[in-house]
Image (cartoon, helix red, strand yellow):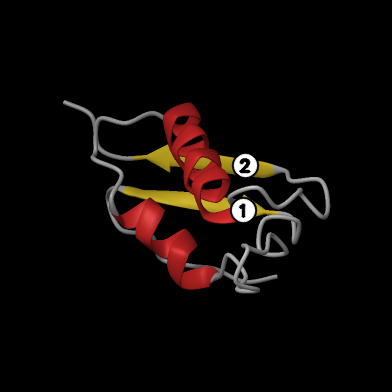
Amino acid sequence: MGEVDLAPEGIIFSCTDGLIDVENELGFYFDEQQLHDVLQNAPGAVSSAEINDRMMQAVDHFRGSRPYPDDIAMLTCRFGVTS
C-alpha cells in the first residue's frame, strides 16, 4: 500500500501484457515508449474511450499483418479540474 501524488490533470493508464507482446513484421515489440507517445499526444479534451481507441489504432498500425499474440485489456482513467 502507498500513496502517489497526482498532478491536477492527468491520466492513469493500465493494460495487460498482451499490449506490449504485439510484434511487428520486423520483429520489434510495441514498447513502453510507444505507449507513452500515444498518451502524451492525447489532447486534454479527449475522453478515456478515445485514448483507448487511439492506443488500439497505434497498435494495429504498428503490427501490420502480424496477428495478435495474446488478448489485450486496457483501463484508462482521465481526471482533472473542471470549471
| Structural crowding at the residue carrying mark 2, measured as other residues with C-alpha within 10 Å and reported as few (<14), some (14–19) or many (≥20) | few
Examine the rendered structure and indicate whether residue 47 appears above or below residue 67: above
Examine the rendered structure and indicate whether residue 28 appears above or below residue 70: below
Q: Where's the C terminus, which quadrant? A: top left
| Percent position of residue 20, x then y | 66, 64
Badge 2 marks a residue whose secondary structure is strand
| Percent position of residue 52, x then y | 52, 37
Question: Residue at label 1?
Answer: 14
Residue drawn where x is 55% and y is 49% of the image: 59
Classify residue 22 by image quadrant: bottom right
Residue drawn where x is 25% and y is 30% of the image: 45
Question: Residue at label 2?
Answer: 75
| Percent position of residue 25, x then y | 63, 63
Q: Where's the N terminus, which quadrant? A: bottom right
| Structural crowding at the residue carrying mark 1, measured as other residues with C-alpha within 10 Å and reported as few (<14), some (14–19) or many (≥20) | few
Q: Is residue 41 left or right of residue 53?
A: left
Badge 2 amino acid: Leu
Q: How many discs mark residues in the rendered view?
A: 2
Do the CB atoms of the residues marked 1 and 2 lie less than 8 Å apart? Answer: yes
* CA gap, disc 1 and disc 2: 5 Å
Residue drawn where x is 49% and y is 39% of the image: 57
Q: Is residue 81 left or right of residue 61?
A: left
- Which one is earlier in the sequence, the residue at label 1 or at label 2? 1
Q: Is residue 83 left or right of residue 40?
A: left
Badge 1 amino acid: Ser
| Percent position of residue 80, x then y | 30, 40
Residue drawn where x is 49% and y is 51% of the image: 12
The residue most toward the right is: 70
